Image: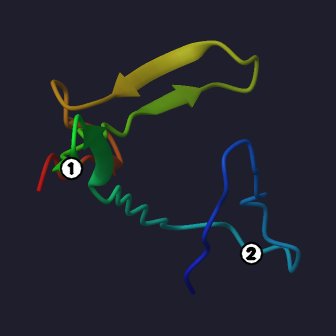
Amino acid sequence: MAISLQKEQKISLEKSNGWNLKQIFVGVNWAAIEKKVIWRHKKVAIDLDASCIIFDANNEVIDTIYFRKLTTQGIKHSGDD
C-alpha cells in the first residue's frame, strides 16, 4: 500500500485490529526542479536525506539513523541511490 504525504501531513502507524506492526518501508523521491537562469530554465538536482529518530516510552531519544550511521538494532537505512 502506497501513501503519498504532503508537507506537515501525518499518519498513524498504530494498527486498529490490535496486531503489532512488524515492518515499515519508507521510500523518498525528490525530482529535479527547474530554476530560471537568466534567459532559460535549468534543471537542478536536489539532495534529499532521510533520517530516523527512535524514542522510548518517555520520549527520550534512544538512537538516530541517517546517511552517516545506516544501521541500528532493527533498523536499516539503505543510503543514497
- Is 13 placed left or right of 48 in the picture? right
From the image, which quarter does the N terminus lie in? bottom right
Quadrant of the rendered image containing residue 26: bottom left
Q: Earlier in the sequence, mark 2 or mark 1?
A: 2
The residue sitting at the right extreme is 16
Q: Whole-percent x and y of residue 65?
A: 33, 30
Seen at 39% across and 34% down, the residue is: 51
Q: Whole-percent x and y of residue 12?
A: 78, 57
Q: Amino acid at mark 1?
A: Arg
Q: CA distance from mark 2 to mark 1?
A: 54 Å
Of circles 2 and 1, which is in front?
A: 1
Q: How many C-alpha atoms fall within 10 Å of the one at disc 1: few (<14), some, or many (≥20)?
A: few
Seen at 75% across and 50% down, the residue is: 9
Label 1 residue SS? strand
Q: Whole-percent x and y of residue 19?
A: 74, 75
Give the labeled residue for mark 2.
19
Give the labeled residue for mark 1.
40
Q: Amino acid at mark 2?
A: Trp
From the image, which quarter does the C terminus lie in? bottom left
